[in-house]
């Protein structure tokens, strides 16, 4: 029997087979189905196929996250249809105003996704949940209508790319710099319909919030999924979530899944994290990656701290530590979108919101917001934004002639203070943030 990679083993498990091969089409049982505003698009096909009920209401998660609160009459109408569907089919996991958040963050922090699961969502960055030891992938609304009705989905087994991360990260270099560096090497289609499996000592040392950034941005490589094997960090993270808390025995059922030693990989990439520097993806593609110190952007109109990639509590903590006692440069706007309501509340309790607000930042509702140019920070013609999000294609954040640069939270924070793209190491010494004299607005 040929050896299998971790992504292959996950699909074998979900299809009830002992062995699956690359290219094989398998029928899989879905564990978690997530639909955000795209749910409005699946109502029609769901009813046209004759479905009268969903396969399992408890396995469906519906976070309204792109235009929340509604920013137009059309988005209000869309939200109303989603609420109606959830009420009609008795779906308990609707995340709406008051407990909202970006869909991928909700899946992770609430504990919906367990090691060994197959997770599908109506958003390309569903890959993010793969950091929890599951196979997670984005699908279209029509496919999701069928999943809602049957709980099943066919999938073609993808080849697997192995990414071995060696060495250690030293602040302010973060996993965002790691994944951007990889995309710079591989290109934004270098893993097209392949699974990316991360491993190595640098992964072992990474906290979950940084792992989630890695799997999230496998989408920007064109990947079908990004996967990290379950370990104690995974179990501890899930233990602290509302849905998975107290279920460690169940969680451990498939926690030991690993690639076989003789597994065949399509490609292998090795990266020494101890040698990485802060990097930036320049317009107009995530693959246009350069070292921050080599790129001159003398006037930054807006800094965006947000998205499913880098708006977790620890990201906001990094930003607040840099901004504390200082002020955003006059002429530069700092807009912040925490990834979920729970992150917002935690930041409120810890004083992070006060620190960032006093420094000149503005907080927005927990949503995708400015990431996709939807609301709360849309860019005008020729405006420049330095962003912690995952994409910077033409017109992504607003006007087609605006420009977006992708960076880590530390790089974004120091850029907000300087008003120009700045290497965050100027604020650090041997991995520690240096005290700095307060700067007036």
Image (cartoon, grey):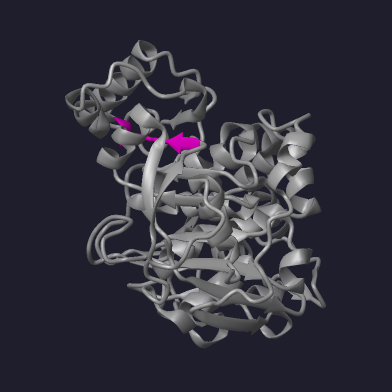
On screen, residue 19 above or below 137: below
- Residue located at (38% from left, 12% from top): 87
Query: Does the rendering let one see residue 171?
Result: no
Which one is in front, 441 or 272?
272
- Residue located at (47% from left, 58% from top): 389
Query: Does the rendering let one see residue 322?
Result: yes
Q: Is 401 positioned to the left or the right of 119 in the image?
A: left
- Residue located at (34% from left, 27% from top): 149
Residue extending farthest front: 1
Which one is in front, 348 or 166?
166
The quadrant of the rendering that contains the C terminus is bottom right
Residue 227 place in picture, x, y as percent = 58, 60
Q: Is 378 positioned to the left or the right of 385 in the image?
A: left
Which one is in front, 343 or 114?
114
Q: Is residue 303 magenta?
A: no
- Residue located at (26% from left, 27% from top): 78
On screen, residue 85 above or below 137: above
Residues in magenta, as a range: 32-39
Residue 256 placement: quadrant? bottom right
Residue 440 place in picture, x, y as percent = 63, 58
Q: Is 148 positioned to the left or the right of 255 in the image?
A: left
On screen, residue 155 above or below 33: below
């Amino acid at each position: 029997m040929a050896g299998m990679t971790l992504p292959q083993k996950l699909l074998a498990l979900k299809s009830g087979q002992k062995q699956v091969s690359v290219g094989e089409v398998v029928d899989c049982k879905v564990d978690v189905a997530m639909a955000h505003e795209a749910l409005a698009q699946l109502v029609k096909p769901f009813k046209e196929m004759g479905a009268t009920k969903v396969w399992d209401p408890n396995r469906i998660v519906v976070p309204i996250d792109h235009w929340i609160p509604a920013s137009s009459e059309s988005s209000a109408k869309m939200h109303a249809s989603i609420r109606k569907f959830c009420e009609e089919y008795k779906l308990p996991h609707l995340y709406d105003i008051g407990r909202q958040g970006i869909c991928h963050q909700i899946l992770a922090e609430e504990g919906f996704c367990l090691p060994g699961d197959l997770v599908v969502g109506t958003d390309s960055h569903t890959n993010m949940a793969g950091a929890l030891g599951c196979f997670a992938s984005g699908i279209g609304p029509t496919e999701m209508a069928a999943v809602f009705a049957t709980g099943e989905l066919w999938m073609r087994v993808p080849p697997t790319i192995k990414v071995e991360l060696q060495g250690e990260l030293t602040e302010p270099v973060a996993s965002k710099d790691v994944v951007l560096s990889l995309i710079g090497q591989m290109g934004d289609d270098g893993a097209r319909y392949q699974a990316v499996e991360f491993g190595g000592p640098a992964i072992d040392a990474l906290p979950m919030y940084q792992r989630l950034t890695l799997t999230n941005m496998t989408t920007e490589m064109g990947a079908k999924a990004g996967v990290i094997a379950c370990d104690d960090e995974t179990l501890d993270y899930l233990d602290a979530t509302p849905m998975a808390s107290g279920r460690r025995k169940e969680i451990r059922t498939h926690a030991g899944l690993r690639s076989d030693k003789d597994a065949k990989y399509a490609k292998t990439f090795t990266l020494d994290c101890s040698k990485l520097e802060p990097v930036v993806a320049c317009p107009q593609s995530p693959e246009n990656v350069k070292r921050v110190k080599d790129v001159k952007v003398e006037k930054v109109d807006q800094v965006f701290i947000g998205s499913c990639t880098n708006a977790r509590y620890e990201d906001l903590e990094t930003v607040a530590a840099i901004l504390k006692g200082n002020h955003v440069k006059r002429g530069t706007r700092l807009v912040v979108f925490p990834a979920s309501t729970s992150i917002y509340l935690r930041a409120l309790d810890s004083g992070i919101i006060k620190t960032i607000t006093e420094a000149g930042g503005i907080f927005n509702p927990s949503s995708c917001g400015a990431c996709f140019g939807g609301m709360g920070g849309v860019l005008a013609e020729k405006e420049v934004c330095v962003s912690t999000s995952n994409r910077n294609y033409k017109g992504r954040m607003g006007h087609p002639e605006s420009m977006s640069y992708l960076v880590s939270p530390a790089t974004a924070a120091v850029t907000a203070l300087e008003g120009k793209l700045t290497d965050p190491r100027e604020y650090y010494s041997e991995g520690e943030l240096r005290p700095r004299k307060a700067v007036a607005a």
